[in-house]
Amino acid sequence: MGNGTSSALGEPVTTPVNQIQETISDHCVVIFSKTSCSYCTMAKKLFHDMNVSYKAVELDTLEYGSQFQDALCKMTGERTVPRIFVNGTFIGGATDTYRLHQEGKLLPLVHQCYLRKSNKHFSDHV
């Protein structure tokens, strides 16, 4: 079988946890979602209304979506969606995210990420 790009069963070489960690480190806001989930839609609308770009990972459209959901459960303690990460940190589901927004804490978390990424980008070019 060796160290090819996939196993004999066609499973991904990198584990779902590794792929999740890579995604959340590459994007300031990541929403692990399902297309049919009303709470997921609410969460995406909140970020959209705040003019904050986000990466949505629709688990019900991924070939390995259930494995991703299992990995998210191990990482966050629950299987429910949405699972929302800001600045690499799990902040909760839709209700938790709305509460942070109402308390005025969500936007500062997002801004911290964009500042960190722009400073890193700037220092890469100096």
Image (cartoon, rainbow, N blue to C red):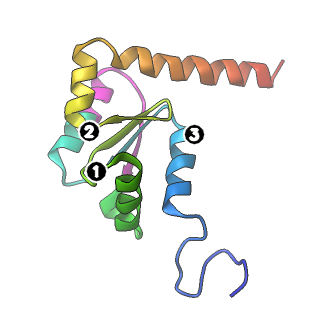
**Residue 118 on image: x %, y %:** 64, 20
Q: Amino acid at mark 1?
A: Glu
Name the residue rendered at 34%, 15% in the picture: 105
Give the magenta range.
Answer: 44-57
Q: Which residue is mark 1?
A: 78
- Name which residue lies at 60% across and 70% down: 13
Q: Are marks 2 and 3 in contact (CB under 8 Å)?
A: no
Q: Is residue 66 above or below residue 85?
A: below
Sequence-first disc among 2 and 3: 3
| Foreground of the two, 97 or 58 | 97
Indicate yes or no whether the magenta region holds residue 48.
yes
Q: Disc 2 residue type?
A: Gly
- On residue 26, the disc is 3
Q: Would residue 27 be found to the left or right of residue 43 on screen? A: right
- Camera sees residue 122: yes
* In-image side of 39 versus 12 (left or right): left
Name the kind of residue labelled 3 in the image: Asp
Label 3 environment density (alpha carbons within 10 Å; few <14, some 14–19, many ≥20)? some
Which residue occupies the foreground of this view, 76 or 106?
76
Residue 17 against residue 88 in the figure, above or below:
below
> Tag 2 or tag 1, which sits nearer the N-term?
1
Residue on which the image places disc 2: 93
